[in-house]
Image (cartoon, rainbow, N blue to C red):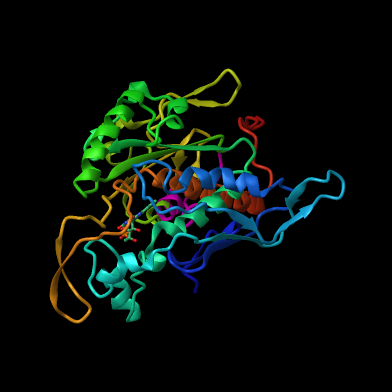
Amino acid sequence: MSYNTFGQMFRVTTFGESHGPAIGCVVDGCPPNIPLTDADIQRELDRRRPGQSRFTTQRREPDMVRILSGVFTHPASGEQVTSGTPIGLMIENVDQRSKDYSDIKDVYRPGHAGYTYDAKYGFHDYRGGGRASARETATRVAAGAIARRIVPGLVVRGALVQMGPHKIERASWSWDEVNSNPFFCPDAKQAAYYADYLDEVRKRGSSVGAVIEIVADGVPPGLGAPIYGKLDGDLAAAVMGINAVKGVEIGAGFAAAELSGEENADEMRVGNDGKPRFLSNNAGGILGGISTGQPVIVRFAVKPTSSILTPRRTVDRYGREAEVSTKGRHDPCVGIRAVPVGEAMVACVIADHYLRQRGQVGASPTWPFDPPKT
Ligand SMILES: Cc1cc2nc3c(=O)[nH]c(=O)nc-3n(C[C@H](O)[C@H](O)[C@H](O)COP(=O)(O)O)c2cc1C
């Protein structure tokens, strides 16, 4: 049993700790002949990289990725392509400051994983959270960059749609805006508000949570398997596996409970292209655990960063009550950098199910079917 691996056919194993020499992953099961360079992966990593604005941790990590294996220069095209063998990726840690954590070596940060690691293993790596640090999520973004290239036409994008209690105006949604502000926020006006709001939170030494929405366009119908390999089930597990995520919704999600059957039903017509056309997408692109061909929509709630300057009551490893405040470098809203991580996890799950579909079914059936002969 391995707990550092996810996926069946597109299989990702990550390794490394926050303050070790390097982090990385092995991506196994990637098909051959997919063009892949370091730059393709670096582009995605740069979106998650810390220290790019005053709203994220000031840890200076260049997050330079090295492809160690699994690529080859194609003999005909001269292009670097995947070879079908395991792809090893490594990112060095260069800005560890373990002494920032020496004061909290033996006390548990409420909301962090120190106590549960102790309860399970009998020790915990207090330096930046060790394996529980979100530093590990860089490797998922790297794997996601490969996953994005597997399904033809797949586009996975994410956006921050709520910070603390403040939601975006959905009518103002612009994908172009997402990459123009430091919050991955699709609503320009709300992004401007978030800047002042988060400055105030940061200066107080506090933190806030966020809601992130991931939209995957170009997902072909038929991905996902009933009933223990449902696409929505695997997406929820993958996204819930991101640090600090406390809730996941697909499509209308929890709001579906408030809708009537009439409101919730995604009615169907035949589109001009002869394919089914859904009149709404409350299902979030998934029915019966299988993709419908509509955009797959995943939303997740990220809790506020638990490392805060305000002292909190806690206990230490030796059974004594204590107080703790964290002086290291932290994101005041971890939800911001969770956006590219969420995109990566969704891309990995969809790529995995695409390969599983191809393995079991081969070419997908063509809809509509011929009517029975009478
Ligand atoms: C991108 C990202 C950055 C994070 N940075 C921090 C941080 O600076 N300080 C902190 O206390 N937690 C941070 N976290 C959250 C912790 O890693 C997480 O809360 C901790 O491992 C406990 O796990 P859990 O919240 O999933 O239960 C971050 C999470 C993400 C997704």
Q: Residue 188 appears in which quarter of the rendering?
A: top left
Nearer to us in this view, 128 or 216: 128
Residue 278, how many percent across, how many down? 46, 27
Residue 275, how many percent across, how many down? 58, 26
Horizontal side, residue 204 vs residue 134: left or right? left
Vertical relation: 200 (above or below) 357:
above
- How many marks do you count on the picture? 0
Query: Measuring 28% from the left and 77% from the top, which residue is drawn there?
Result: 119
Magenta highlight range: 220-238
Vertical relation: 318 (above or below) 171:
below
Vertical relation: 362 (above or below) 319:
above
Residue 225 visible in image = no
Residue at the right extreme, as displayed: 76
Nearer to us in this view, 53 or 301: 53
Residue at the top extreme, as displayed: 272
Query: Measuring 49% from the left and 42% from the top, which residue is drawn there?
Result: 47
Residue 234 within the magenta-colored segment of the rendering: yes
Horizontal side, residue 18 vs residue 352: left or right? left
Residue 58, how many percent across, how many down? 38, 50
Q: Residue 127 appears in which quarter of the rendering?
A: bottom left
Query: Measuring 19% from the left and 46% from the top, which residue is drawn there?
Result: 204
Horizontal side, residue 339 vs residue 40: left or right? left
Nearer to us in this view, 119 or 288: 119
Quarter holding ligand 1: bottom left
* The C terminus, quarter of image: top right
Query: Measuring 26% from the left and 59% from the top, which residue is drawn there?
Result: 327
